[in-house]
Image: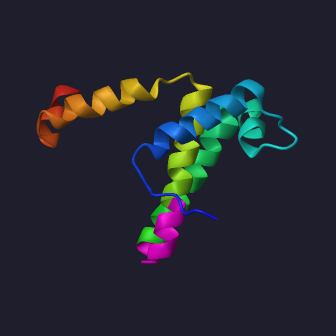
């Protein structure tokens, strides 16, 4: 079995797969389709759960768990974006704009 080379583009590939499950997935056989069918509260609860697990992995200094939980957080964030029809490209543009200024300036500009 060929090993996939990790790439930042994996996020775009994963988002496309999530959107496909949203459009045509079977909640009986797809976790993504099932979660999306349960609505925003379920998607939010699951993301919240995964963030807490990531925090605990960091606090417990378990590097492998940090990696696994980080992947879970990213996946469930993308599911939430799909559910809320958030355009990933818009998020990327917002991040790019924020990179043009210091974090402190950016935070103060939102006040």
Instruction: Give residue 63's position: percent from left, percent from top.
Output: 44, 75
Out of 21 and 34, give the one closest to the viewer. 21
Instruction: Indicate the position of residue 7 as horizontal and vertical percent values.
Output: 41, 51
Q: What's the residue at 56%, 41% (across, down)?
A: 14
In the rendered structure, does residue 46 fall within the stretch colored magenta? Answer: no
Foreground residue among 102 and 108: 102
Q: Which residues are magenta?
A: 59-69
**Vertical comparison of 6 with 21: above or below:** below
Residue 23 image point, x, y percent:
72, 24
Q: Residue at x 69, y 39 (%)?
A: 42
Main SS type for the magenta part?
A: helix
Percent position of residue 93, x then y: 30, 27
Q: Which of the two residues, 99 or 41, is positioned nearer the viewer here?
A: 99
Residue drawn where x is 47% and y is 67% of the image:
66
Q: How many marks?
A: 0
Image-based side of 73 in relation to 8, left or right: right
Can residue 55 be seen here? The reply is: yes
């Amino acid at each position: 079995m060929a090993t996939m080379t990790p790439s930042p583009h994996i996020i775009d590939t994963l988002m496309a797969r999530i959107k496909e499950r949203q459009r045509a997935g079977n909640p009986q056989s797809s976790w993504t389709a099932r979660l999306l069918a349960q609505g925003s509260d379920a998607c939010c609860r699951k993301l919240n759960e995964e963030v807490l697990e990531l925090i605990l992995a960091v606090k417990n200094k378990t590097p492998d768990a940090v990696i696994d939980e980080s992947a879970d957080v990213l996946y469930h964030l993308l599911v939430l974006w799909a559910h809320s029809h958030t355009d990933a490209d818009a998020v990327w543009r917002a991040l790019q704009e924020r990179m043009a200024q210091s974090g402190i300036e950016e935070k103060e500009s939102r006040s």
